[in-house]
Amino acid sequence: MKVHTILAATGAALAFAVAGSASAHDGRAETVTPRFDQAIPNIPGKSLVVLEVDYAPDAASPPHTHAKSAFIYAYVVSGEIESKVNDGETRIYHAGESWSEPPNARHSISRNASRTRPAKLLAVFVVDSDDKALVTPIK
């Protein structure tokens, strides 16, 4: 793995964790864990980065954007995730469901839809290998 993509994934995890802590109710926050990071051998300059996002009950991420080069595939592993990307509809995704986010998308809602049960998703990024910040909170 390249050091800069490891740093990017770690930075994304930290940005999600810090931002999530600030917006979660009653101190409940998300936990972001980097799970995979590797350059794509047949697509020069691109990497595949996978982050696991665990949401405590009622936890949420603040509105954010992702790296301008990032195409994202999100898969709900367990629980229910409420999401809104760009001007699309707000939707609740259940375990086994997924969605995608185009490059430079605005993710205005990303949260656990349950107040009592945890939720987990995998965020799979296809991103320029030199992009450092995978997540940028919207102020």
Image: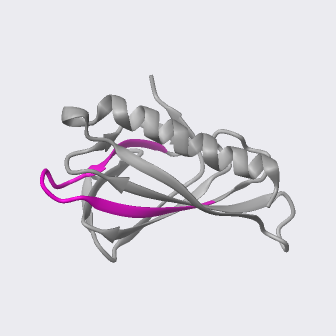
Q: Relative to 99, is 102 on the left or the right?
A: right
Question: Please, is residue 55 above or below residue 123 in the view?
Answer: above
Residue 105 image point, x, y percent: 51, 46
- Residue 20 placement: quadrant: top left
Most foreground residue, 98 or 53: 53
Q: Quadrant of the N terminus?
A: bottom right
Task: Based on the picture, tell me whether residue 120 belongs to the magenta stretch.
Answer: yes
Residue 38 image point, x, y percent: 74, 65
Residue lying at the far top of the rendered structure: 139
Question: How many discs appear?
Answer: 0
Question: Please, is residue 95 above or below residue 60 in the view?
Answer: below
Residue lying at the far bottom of the rendered structure: 96
Question: Please, is residue 18 above or below residue 37 in the view?
Answer: above
Q: How is the image coloured?
A: one colour
Extent of the magenta region = 106-125
Q: Relative to 70, is 39 on the left or the right?
A: right
Q: Quadrant of the C terminus?
A: top left
Residue 25 image point, x, y percent: 21, 35
Residue shown at the point (32%, 52%) measured from the top left: 55
Residue 57 image point, x, y percent: 20, 51
Residue shown at the point (40%, 63%) measured from the top left: 121
Residue shown at the point (33%, 77%) measured from the top left: 96
Q: Relative to 59, is 100 on the left or the right?
A: right
User: Secondary structure of the magenta portion, mostly?
Assistant: strand
Task: Based on the picture, tell me whether residue 68 belongs to the magenta stretch.
Answer: no
- Residue 76 placement: quadrant: bottom left
Q: Relative to 84, is 35 on the left or the right?
A: right
